[in-house]
Amino acid sequence: MLTSFMSYLGSQFSPGVAGNQLWALIYILIIFAGVSVAVIAMNWLERKALAHFQVRLGPMRVGPHGLLQPIADALKLLLKEDIIPAEADQVVFWVAPLIGLLAAFTVYTVVPFGPSQAVSDMNIGILFMLGVSSLGVLGIVTAGWASNSHYPLIGALRSSAQMVSYEVAMGLAVVSAILMTSLNESGTGTLSMIGIVQAQQQQGIWFIFKFFPLGLIAFVIFAIAMVAETNRAPFDLAEAESELTAGFHTEYSGLRWSLFMLAEYAAMIAVSSIAVTLWLGGWMHPFPNLLSAPAWEFIFSLFPALTFGGLAAIAFLGAARMPGHSFFKIQRAGLAVFAALLGVLALLLLVVAIAGRHADTSIAARFREGIDYVYWFVLKVAVFMYLFIWYRATWPRYRFDQLMKVGWKVMLPISLGVLIVTAIVGVLVK
Amino acid sequence: MTDPRSLSPLDLETCEKPYLDSNELIINMGPQHPATHGVLRVILKLDGEKVLGTECVIGYLHRGVEKIAENRTYTMFNPYVDRMDYVAAVSNGLGYCQAVEKLLNVEAPPRANYIRVILTELNRIASHQLWLGTHALDIGAMTPLFYTFRDREEILKIFEKYCGARLTTHAFRIGGCQYETYAGFEKDVKNFLAFFPPKIVEYEALLTGNRIWLERTKKVGVISAADAIALGVTGPVLRASGVKWDIRKAQPYANYADFDFEIPTGENGDTFDRYMVRMVEMRQSLRIIEQAVNGIPEGPIMAKVPKVIKPAVGEIYHSIEAPKGELGYFIVSDGSTQPYRLRVRPPSFVNLQALDIMVRGMLVADVVAVIGTLDIVLGEVDR
């Protein structure tokens, strides 16, 4: 077991490809925990950012600046009475949130946080991702049906129609990005998630800028479709609060409800990572074609440490700015400890960045590389997460028929046109 | 004109049938529902998402205000009217006080009228702000709600300084105003006049040009002028259908005749026109307030009114233009200290009747948009 553990260190391949089951398990646990923590962080960030968009403060009481609010929420949801309506289909009602959760988490198998920082790399990776993430709709439909109630039923119908129609435009946009992968020296395209990023690496360009503006249009279509796919505002018809009270999860409460929320946020991160992989260069740092000198590599490798250092500084500033009243003593101390933790993390990252500054095959260099890859990937996904919140704060909700109209009459023709033009241009360039 | 009476009421027996076997779905929206603005219950008959018919069930907030009036003296009843349309309490009070003044043949002094106009128009803005926030929230835009509530606070602060209350103000008395304006009242109002116009621009920046907002409001909940008149619809809803009817101009009360302002009207009678009419109305209210606060005369604020109000036998109907439409009071006096009968004509109640013909054939999402655009307050509907 120890040899299995040691033999993988420094490998160029993901554990799935290298056939190392122990490390695959470790990666799975890391990703599962990481995504769960990201969902919790996202929960806090959404409440906070939304509050600041709306001239209010958001959670302020549980922990400094409400930092512990998600934990308090999670505890509350766990301790809540577990209600299954008498009229509901008991088994299906019980299984429905699990389907959504399973679909949302399974896609992380192929999410490429780095060239070897993924559980596995399938040669049909993108198909797997699209296919499995579409299974999420099953959870919503079964939940709406099993509740045996009017509002959930309508919510479920809406969401199934919505997801099916937006998947078409989404799929075509994805195909136009995949076409671009075949413009390598080798001349073969790939469906593998890691392969797609490597194709961008070889061509020295993010696909969003490829054949400008074709890549950009495909990206924008995907970015719109993915909001619809995850049932977020302004396409949150399935859970439209003002119309259907809570839509498909009206009858759900407590733990089961929180599973739906977990699945929703996990799905948001998953689709964002597809967008990042296909168009935004996955784990690559910005301007891979221009700024690839070793000095630049070193500067970019300092970014993780700088980010955490910045966060630590903000937290310290927050602690310093807290009112001097004794009431805030514990909060101030808590925030200072949090800032110190962030600072220590920043220092560790700095040490790693300096220790592994030489691009060789030593463990330190490999470790530094891995951190860089994951950092840039997560940063790009985080931008999308913030956009999700921004959309929600800004836009009204589409009506059902308008949503269909946009999906079928606007997005589908455009994505089809982009696909055809991309194909033609690709052939001409080749 | 569709005669509303010819539309068949819902066949409630279909509720008994298992819904999976039938094509129509009966769902109950409210009385506990986030978008019914209180405790309105709407029974919807749906074909998929399409609305085949609606039936409003009201009375969940019935407090018997009209009956209470019969057991209170004219003065004692005054605070009760604030509780009907609680977001436009000042207008309610103005209508009631003026109705009793008319019964008594008393005229409020000019200074009192100016104060009344300033406060009532401020209240109109506050009411429209609340309408805008909740209406946008119904359509899915969360943020305008917080912006309007933030700015409404400035108006409520003026109310609080003037009479000590923010919502149920009880600002006026029969015969005038009880309170003289506080020191700095005019300055506060003028500050608000400078503060508010950019805020309207801010609301409009979020909504007016927004594609989704336009799609959600244009051609939604259309009501023709003829239909609106036949149903007795008043206020911004009627004006959005193109009828230039505003009691402030048609039958000027208080001293509205002295002021120069315009009555905005729409063309299509859809939700967007109603939105625009109310947005323009807020600006017109600012114009009125500006003229009033600059021309406010000195003088007494109460007319000579007997301590015990005992109007002669008779009856009176007086109506004013409340933010939501024509607010009328019909008072029958038998010569005693208490009204023999007091009947309120609430704009919300009458406007709500238009819901059915406005949403027939539309989708579920439009029902909440139309409820929002009608700007109903259930306290006033049920009384």
Image (cartoon, rainbow, N blue to C red):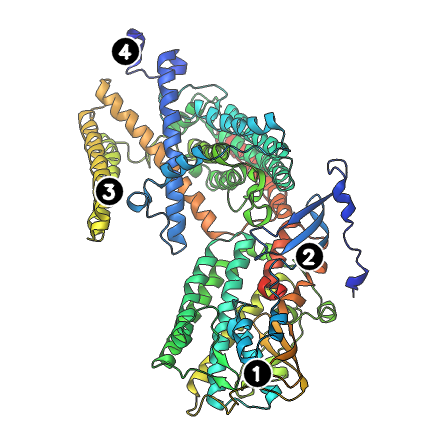
Badge 3: how crowded within 10 Å, few (<14), some, or many (20+)?
A: many
Q: Residue under circle 4?
A: A6
Task: Determine if marks 2 and 3 fall on one subunit.
Answer: no
Task: Determine if marks 3 and 1 fall on one subunit.
Answer: no
- CA distance for labels 2 and 4: 72 Å
Closer to viewer: mark 2 or mark 3: 2
Closer to viewer: mark 3 or mark 4: 3
Left or right: residue A113 compared with residue B141: left
**Mark on residue B98?**
1
Task: Determine if marks 3 and 4 fall on one subunit.
Answer: yes
Q: Is residue A385 above or below residue B71?
A: above
Badge 2: how crowded within 10 Å, few (<14), some, or many (20+)?
A: some
Query: Which three-letter amino acid code belongs to the residue tagged 3?
Result: Leu
Name the image quarter holding the C terminus of chain B: bottom right
Q: Secondary structure at mark 4?
A: helix
- CA distance for labels 2 and 3: 52 Å
Front-lying residue, B292 or A161:
B292
Q: Secondary structure at mark 3?
A: helix
Q: Position of residue B111 (x, y in %)?
A: 46, 88
Badge 4: how crowded within 10 Å, few (<14), some, or many (20+)?
A: few
- CA distance for labels 2 and 1: 32 Å
Q: Residue under circle 2?
A: B56
Q: Position of residue B322 (x, y in %)?
A: 57, 74
**Mark on residue A335?**
3
Query: Which three-letter amino acid code belongs to the residue tagged 4?
Result: Met
Q: Determine contact: label 2, label 3, CB under 8 Å.
A: no
Residue A283 appears in the figure? yes
Q: Position of residue B323 (x, y in %)?
A: 56, 71
